[in-house]
Image (cartoon, rainbow, N blue to C red):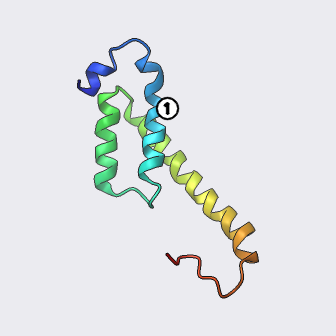
Amino acid sequence: EQVAELMQRPGMSMICRGSHDEELRWCSADGPLTPDELDRLQKGADSMGIPRETFAEVHQIVVDEQALRARRYELIVAPVLPKNVETNSS
């Protein structure tokens, strides 16, 4: 079934915004979203009936959360790491 058809099922409209938030967070787990990723996610949100303003706002929340996690890391974790430990090593 197409996403638009799924959204017509009972209860689906109640979960679309939450799933949209999860999709944005999952796709940005490896770094900032690329324009191609944003375009695909926007198309998915459009098919779920999520307004573009809502998409943009949820995307900004995800970006802000990532910045706060990085800030927390730099403030709390990084200062106590041994100086010879490289944080970006695989």
Which residue is farthest left? 1
Q: Quadrant of the N terminus?
A: top left
Q: Residue at x 64, y 83 (%)?
A: 85
Displayed quadrant of residue 75: bottom right
Give 78 or 67, whichever is nearer the viewer. Answer: 78
Callout count: 1
Q: Position of residue 16 (x, y in %)?
A: 43, 27
- Is 5 on the left-hand or right-hand side of 57? left
- Considering the numbered disc 1 on the image, is that residue within a helix, a strand or a loop? helix
- As displayed, is residue 61 above or below residue 71? above
Q: Residue at x 35, y 14 (%)?
A: 9
Q: Position of residue 48 (x, y in %)?
A: 34, 27
Q: Residue at x 58, y 59 (%)?
A: 67
Displayed quadrant of residue 11: top left
- Is 14 on the left-hand or right-hand side of 87? left
Q: Residue at x 27, y 23 (%)?
A: 4
Give 64 or 74, whichever is nearer the viewer. Answer: 74
- As displayed, is residue 35 above or below residue 16? below
- Give the amino acid type for the residue marked by disc 1 in the picture: Gly
Give 25 or 42, whichever is nearer the viewer. Answer: 25
- Is 41 on the left-hand or right-hand side of 63? left
Q: Position of residue 35 (x, y in %)?
A: 31, 55
Which residue is farthest front? 90
- Is 79 on the left-hand or right-hand side of 69? right
- As displayed, is residue 77 above or below residue 28? below
Q: Which residue is mark 1?
A: 18
* Circle 1 residues within 10 Å: few <14, some 14–19, many ≥20: few
